[in-house]
Image (cartoon, rainbow, N blue to C red):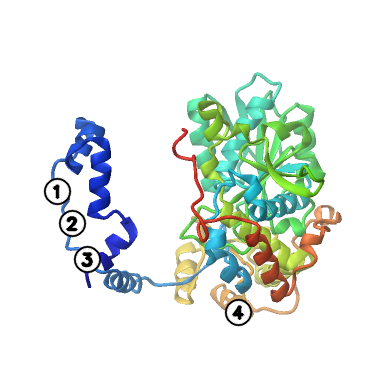
Amino acid sequence: MSQEMTFRNRHIGLSEGDQQHMLNTLGLRSMTELSDAIVPENIRKRREMSLPKALSESDALALLKTIANKNTVVRTLIGQGYYHTLTPLVIQRNVLENPAWYTAYTPYQPEISQGRLEALFNYQTMVVELTGLTVANASLLDEATAAAEAMTLCERSSKSKSKRFYVADNLFSQTRAVVETRAQPLGYEVVTFDPHHPPAFEDAFGLLVQYTGRDGSVVDLRPLIEQAKAAKILTIVAADILSLTRLEAPGHLGADICLGSTQRFGVPMGNGGPHAAFFAVSDPLKRSIPGRLVGQSIDSEGRPAFRLTLQTREQHIRREKATSNICTAQVLLANIAGFYACYHGPKGLTAIAHRIHAMAGRLHAALVEKGYAVNPSFFDTLSVTVDDVESIRQHALTAGLNLFVADPHTIGLSLDEASTEAELEALASVFKVNLTDRRETGLPAGLVRKTPFMTQEAFNRYHSETEMMRYLRKLSDRDLALDRAMVHSLMHHER
């Protein structure tokens, strides 16, 4: 293979002639001289890097495959904000694997980004409908950092001068870790509480609770929110977006902010993440919301048009005064989640959630009948008290299942869209219980969703693969991405 056909030359792109032209333009003689001019001596590495001889692209891929094949691949049911999902093939082919969508990043020029903006507007509408709040942004980095953003939003917006922030003890561990890390340099006092038995809250600027919790139990938000409001504390709910098709929306229960991950809406597991976070607020907080928002307006000829609104908070414009960094917006993954909602619609999403809950209910009934202590309320996650956690975990691994060790006496599992009857039977075998048609209902009667959602045309029209394919093509034809042209980005140059 000639030098011009190597992986390096295909992907780096600069030929020797290009390098010399660049150096001549800069008035320099060599790349070493360029490095001397721009890299401070105290961080400059003068030694050659100790690297093996370069492999060809095909040889490197073969080696990586050999290494990957040494892994033992099991079905992971740990939950905790990460779930298996079934990406519809029409979305996988036409969005995830399509450069018209995966190279389209930040729509700095809305007039040539109408397709992208409509897709993100659908995403925002989906979030508003499911959370029951007024305004949603066009995604953030992940659930944990979104929670930290919500905490600082509350501190900015609260009338309280207190630095106290209440955090429920049912948060996912990664969410709690990020919140505490962000709070420390800001001087916030993080106070833990039991959301099932809320205390008499003292003066504080905000409160954060998980719905449903890390142990799978469903918190009744109403008394919690009522107590917080009486103490003039802003309330944040970290929610499972799929569960909101079956559980009443936090906004309808009085929450000020609702956030979470959209990963289980068709987004493949990205080796642990991150996955696009949703973030919605009540009307009084709409001008403090982090990230970017897409709005619908009309153009100079009176036709409907989409545009970025309230984007003056973005990092590339306000720099150190910005409330968030535009790079934290997960545009491709947000689009996948939004299109997943369009493809399934409200009935399809509810059916997926109902099936998951029904399977969890059957396993729950079998566990309780055998005498296990299990959380009485649940959506998809069961926390089981056992005598020997390690024995259960090893038995599950032998069956090809990876369960969550919550503590020395509790093992957890979360069912999802990819769960099957065979998998349920395998779980029953791990716990030595017998499945029947009997199932427990884990949703508290007073929290079952009664309000309609996602009645807009976008969520009730594109349910066939052909209709969805045509819609995706129509939107990409209204856009400009790297499959057709170079899109100039100021993102990294204006910080």
On the rendered structure, is 206 left or right of 388? Answer: right
On the rendered structure, is 287 left or right of 165? Answer: right
What is the secondary structure assignment of the residue under circle 2? Answer: loop
Q: Which residue is mark 4?
A: 425
What is the secondary structure assignment of the residue under circle 4? Answer: helix
Q: Which residue is mark 3?
A: 3
Mark earlier in primary sequence (2, 3): 3
Residue 399 screen position, x and y as percent: 48, 77
CA gap, disc 3 to disc 1? 22 Å
Q: Is residue 251 visible?
A: yes
Dots 3, 1 in contact, CB < 8 A? no
**Pair 1/4: label in front:** 1
Label 4 crowd bin: few (<14), some (14–19), many (20+), radius 10 Å: some
Residue 356 vertical position relative to residue 385 in the rendered view, above or below? below
Dots 2, 3 in contact, CB < 8 A? no
Residue type of the residue flagged with mark 3: Gln
Determine the residue located farthest toward the top in the rendered image: 161
Label 2 crowd bin: few (<14), some (14–19), many (20+), radius 10 Å: few
CA gap, disc 1 to disc 4? 57 Å
Residue 315 or 142: which is nearer the viewer? 315
Q: Residue at x 28, y 71 (%)?
A: 63
Mark earlier in primary sequence (3, 1): 3
